[in-house]
Image (cartoon, grey):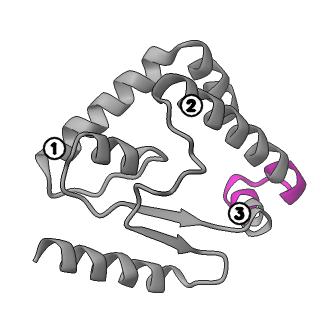
Amino acid sequence: MSLAEFGVHAQDHPEIDIELDRRLTERAREGGCVIESRLAGWLTSRAELPAVRVWIDCSEQIRAERVARRDGTTVEQAMLDNGARAELEHARYLSVYDIDLNDRSTYDLVLESTDAPAADLADDVIRAAVARFS
């Protein structure tokens, strides 16, 4: 099933998100890990777990270009797919968790990746982790 199909399926089956996010939170509780998820910052915050919560933003155009390159599709199709996924996930997470994905207040760092090299973003995250955990 494609990512888009899975999103629609998960919308009709909230137990999928609940179980996946329960597992992510369990793993975060063990420590010594990096967890990537649209909700990781919120999950660790609500569970009061020590973490560096990072949100990485990007312009819609560059994000579509990156997805198109990765998935072997057109930028236009990636833009449509990204928009549909964002709308679906926003509604799903609001319904299941009362989390608004547009609210970045729980994050320690909100980084802009549109023009920033990945190495620079990684350096920012590492600096924050060292400051938080050393």
Q: Check the picture and name the quadrant holding the N terminus.
A: top right
Q: Check the picture and name the quadrant holding the C terminus.
A: bottom left
With 20 as the anchor, is 85 left or right in this view?
A: right
Q: Are marks 3 and 2 in contact (CB under 8 Å)?
A: no
Point out which mark residue 29 bears: 1
Where residue 96 appears, x then y in whole percent? 50, 23
Three-letter code for the amino acid on which mark 1 is drawn: Arg
Quadrant assignment, res 112:
bottom right
Magenta: main secondary structure: helix
Point out which mark residue 103 bears: none
For discs 2 and 1, the disc positioned in front in the rendered view: 2
Residue placed most toward the observer, 80 or 73 = 80
**Disc 2 crowd, CA 10 A, few/some/many (<14, 14-19, 20+):** few
What residue did someone put label 2 on?
94
> Can residue 1 be seen in this snapshot?
no
With 93 as the anchor, is 19 left or right in this view?
A: left
Q: CA distance from mark 1 to mark 3?
A: 31 Å
With 32 as the anchor, is 60 left or right in this view?
A: right
Q: CA distance from mark 3 to mark 2?
A: 23 Å
Where residue 54 appears, x then y in whole percent? 41, 63
Residue placed most toward the observer, 3 or 43 = 43
The residue depicted at 19 percent of the width and 49 percent of the height is 49
Where residue 122 appears, x then y in whole percent? 40, 78
Where residue 79 appears, x then y in whole percent? 82, 53
User: Is residue 122 depicted above or below 61 in this figure?
Assistant: below
Q: Which badge, 3 or 2, comes first in the chain's sequence?
A: 3
Point out which mark residue 63 bears: 3
